[in-house]
């Protein structure tokens, strides 16, 4: 799970304190993959490639895709429009 995507909704709906409470919960239930240089380089490649094709997507989705790609994980999403064709495995 990408913390930004998850926490953003909580931050907007319930405020910063609620988002930080949820962040603590994330650390208890799963592995947190922190962005590193490999993820940032992959994000750069994905972003530039998509923009070059006239298919830009939000940067938050670029980070999700890059993190998934570099970590070798599968991505559970319903947003196949943004994540399809990026070379990552999507699961329902």
Image: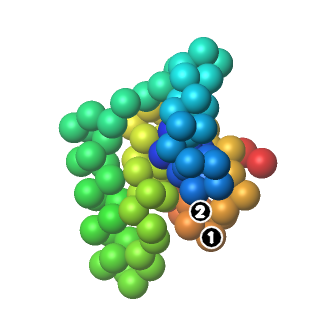
Residue 81's label in the rendered image is: 1
Q: How crowded is mark 1: few (under 14 residues within 10 Å), some or many (20 or more)?
A: few
Q: In this view, does 13 lie above or below 19?
A: below
Q: Can I make out residue 55 in this image?
A: yes
Dot 1 falls on a residue whose secondary structure is: helix
Image: 66 above or below 81 = above
Q: State the mark number for residue 9.
A: none
Instruction: Name the residue rendered at 43%, 28% in the picture.
Output: 33
Identify the residue at image location x=31%, y=78%. Answer: 52
Report the number of numbered marks.
2
Residue 67 rendering spot, x and y as whole percentages = 43, 41
Q: Residue at x 77, y 48 (%)?
A: 92
Farthest residue in the bottom direction? 54
Quarter of the image with the N terminus in it: top right
Does residue 73 appear anywhere in the picture?
no
Residue 3 position in % (x across, y down): 51, 39
For this rendering, which residue is in front, 48 or 10? 10
Q: How is the image coloured?
A: rainbow
For this orientation, the residue located farthest to the top is 28
Position of residue 64 measured from the top left corner of the image (x, y, whole percent): 48, 49
Q: Name the residue under label 2.
A: 84
- Image x and y of residue 44, in percent: 26, 57
The answer to whether 34 appears left or right of 7 in the picture is left
Viewer-nearest residue: 3 or 33? 3
The answer to whether 69 is drawn above or below residue 61 in the figure is above
Residue 62 left/right relative to 39 = right
Dot 2 and dot 1 residues touching (CB under 8 Å):
yes
SS state under label 2: loop
The residues bearing labels 2 and 1 have C-alpha atoms spaced at a distance of 6 Å
Depth check: 54 or 62 in front? 62
């Amino acid at each position: 799970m990408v913390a930004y995507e998850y926490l953003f909704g909580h931050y907007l709906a319930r405020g910063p304190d609620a988002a930080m409470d949820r962040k603590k919960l994330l650390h208890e239930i799963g592995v947190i993959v922190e962005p590193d240089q490999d993820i940032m380089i992959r994000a750069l490649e994905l972003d530039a490639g998509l923009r070059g094709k006239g298919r830009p997507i939000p940067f938050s989705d670029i980070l999700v895709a890059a993190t998934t790609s570099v970590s070798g994980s599968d991505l559970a999403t319903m947003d196949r429009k943004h994540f399809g064709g990026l070379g990552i495995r999507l699961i329902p």
